Image (cartoon, rainbow, N blue to C red):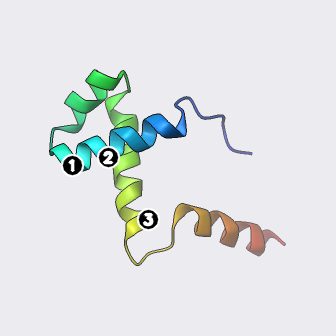
Amino acid sequence: MAAPRKYPDELRERAIREVRTTGRPIAHVAKDLGIHKEALRGWVRQAKVNRSDRLTTAELDELKQLRKE
C-alpha cells in the first residue's frame, strides 16, 4: 500500500504549474509555497514523464497490479 500523501493534490498542481509557467527555480517556488524542494523536483520530473509518450504513473500502477494477478 502506498504511503499517505503529505501535500494536497491542489498544492502539487499549483507548484508544478508555477515552475512551468514562470521559469523560476524549483528551490524558490518550493520555499515560497512551503514545500520541500526535492519533493517539488520529483513532482515536476514525474509530470514531464506523464506528458510524454511513456506510460503514466497510473498506467504503471495498473500494469503492476495486472501482472500480480
25 relative position to 16: left or right:
left
Residue drawn at 15 percent across, 39 percent down:
24
Residue 60 is situated, as x and y percent measured from the top left of the image, at 60, 67
Q: Kindly report the distance in space between the C-alpha atoms of the residues bearing marks 1 and 2.
A: 6 Å
Looking at the image, residue 9 lies above or below residue 34: below
Task: Assess whether mark 2 and mark 1 are in contact (beta carbons under 8 angstroms).
Answer: yes
Label 1: how many residues lie within 10 Å, few (<14), some (14-19) or many (20+)?
Answer: few
Looking at the image, residue 65 lies above or below residue 17: below
Q: Mark 2 points at which residue?
A: 17
Residue 1 is situated, as x and y percent measured from the top left of the image, at 75, 45
Residue drawn at 66 percent across, 34 percent down:
4
Q: Name the residue under label 1.
A: 21
30 relative position to 58: left or right:
left
Please say whether residue 34 is visible from this viewpoint: yes
Q: What residue type is labelled 1?
A: Thr
For numbered disc 2, what is the local secondary structure? helix
- Choose the circle earlier in sequence order: 3 or 1: 1
Q: Which amino acid does label 2 sit on?
A: Arg
In the rendered structure, find residue 50 and report the number of the disc placed on it: 3
- Given residues 5 and 20, the one toward you in this image is 20
- Furthest residue toward bottom: 53
For numbered disc 3, what is the local secondary structure? helix
